[in-house]
Image (cartoon, rainbow, N blue to C red):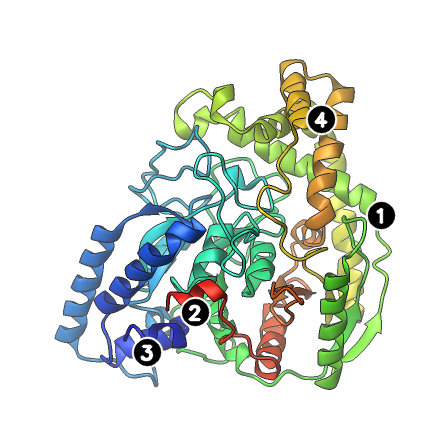
Amino acid sequence: MHSDYLAHDATGLAELVRTRQTSARELLDIAISRTEAVNPAINAIVLKDYDAARQRASRDDANRAANGAGHANGTSTQSALAGVPYLIKDLGAPVAGLRMSMGSRHYRHFIPTEDAPVVTLAKAAGLNIFAKTSTSELGQMPYTEPELFGACRNPWSLDHTPGGSSGGAAAAVAAGIVPLAHASDGGGSIRIPASCCGLFGLKPSRGRVPKAVQARAAGDLGVDHAVSRSVRDSALLLDLLAGHADRPLGAPGTFLGASREPCKPLNIAYVTEPMLAPALSADSRAALDDAAQLASSLGHRIEPVSLDIDFAAVRHAFLMLWSVTAEDLVLNAERISGRKPLRDEFEISTWAMAHVGRKLGERGLPGALEEQRRITERLTDLLNRYDVILCATLAAPPIKIGEMHPTSTERMQMRAVTAMPLEALLKKVLAEASDKAFTWAGCTELFNLSGQPAMSVPLYWNARGLPVGVQFAAPEGGEATLLRLATQLEAARPWFDRRPPLMQARS
């Protein structure tokens, strides 16, 4: 089975368990073995819960043997991933009894007592949670290099980032530890690492998936889902998370069912604007042009479009909303952790963003919410005229580890501004820090503001062998359209068997 593990997605592995060609315990042992083999190189796993997972797998196998093997036909969605090893991101999705550090020294001893809804649903589906994956501190950065755990690395090139904040999830899937892993997206944190790691990543519509609310989530930007190697795995998991678990597997009206339906010719708005980034790199533009040509060859109508949006206003609104959430997780941390926040328990950039929230974000919140309404209205209008939008996921390929760390001068300014939060200095520090992040990762935030579903699809690798995803967005509630299109693209340009050097060397 070890040699076959990488040849199957999660749906395929579950089918092997259901038909007794393998067992949940055997799959778990393989996932643990792969973790021990590759995690020293990529640093994706930050907490292990092997013993409890082994007990669950053995118990489930015994129950399965007692009840008899299932059959593929007529199987409910609920049981369609039973027996598959699974990873939970160490942020925003608490697992009862397991530490949730959120990449932060302050929260490193925080142990939730209740499961998040997505965890409850994953457990009910038979997914076996055996470890947790790395994230940037409190999900603040689009790369995964928390001081608490150290840098998480990209299996395609260990010198490069897997993206963030769900970087650990994406690195683990790309390295073949699991075919599917929990991820969340408040500003691109599913789509950015999917692009960096050559994976499929779908951010569902706002409110599609129930979530735990631990902190004030200004603007309701975030949503939980996954990164995966196959489209059907993401479709099936979305059924489980969105309340379709009681329906027959792949039934009409389910997301898996939609992914199996033919994709009709779509009217695609082709956007080459860099959005919050100053410009698109040659690689990102080449990936976009390639995707447009591929979609056209499949019968879709491609029309270049300008979004006609004030991106300076978008940027300001997003930062105000983001800072208010940071304020709550940092300066009001005692409400969650039961301990008063101390300056040396947080990274300086996170601490500074929290002070931006307290000084600027609270006052700017009404205006930011109004700008969010205008952005949503504009994109809704555009998607009344087009079926989907095609645009960049990232302005450039994966950056190198450490490339975005604050310089010594920037760190000094951040310390000064938190000690004496003068408005002019706060604005200067915020502008400089956000310039650095948005130069690379400024193409995803728009759809968190609007709440519309968006996906990153791995269709292009650059000359250096690094993946560069492209992004498609649909009207609110339009996940079925995206999944039909993604399945069509997956068939036309298969990526499942494209494996990074690390995955090949240790398979």
Mark toward the viewer: 2 or 3 = 2
* Residue at (47% x, 25% y) in the render: 345
Q: CA distance from mark 4 to mark 1?
A: 20 Å
- What amino acid is at disc 2? Gln
SS category of the residue bearing label 2: helix
* Residue at (56% x, 65% y) in the render: 198
Q: Residues within 10 Å of mark 2 (few under 14, many from 20)?
A: few
Res 8 seen here: no
Q: CA distance from mark 3 to mark 4?
A: 52 Å
* Residue at (34% x, 51% y) in the render: 131
- What amino acid is at disc 1? Asp
Q: CA distance from mark 2 to mark 1?
A: 45 Å
Viewer-closest of 318 and 117: 318
Image-quadrant location for residue 495: bottom right
Q: Which residue position holds label 4?
A: 360
Res 129 seen here: yes
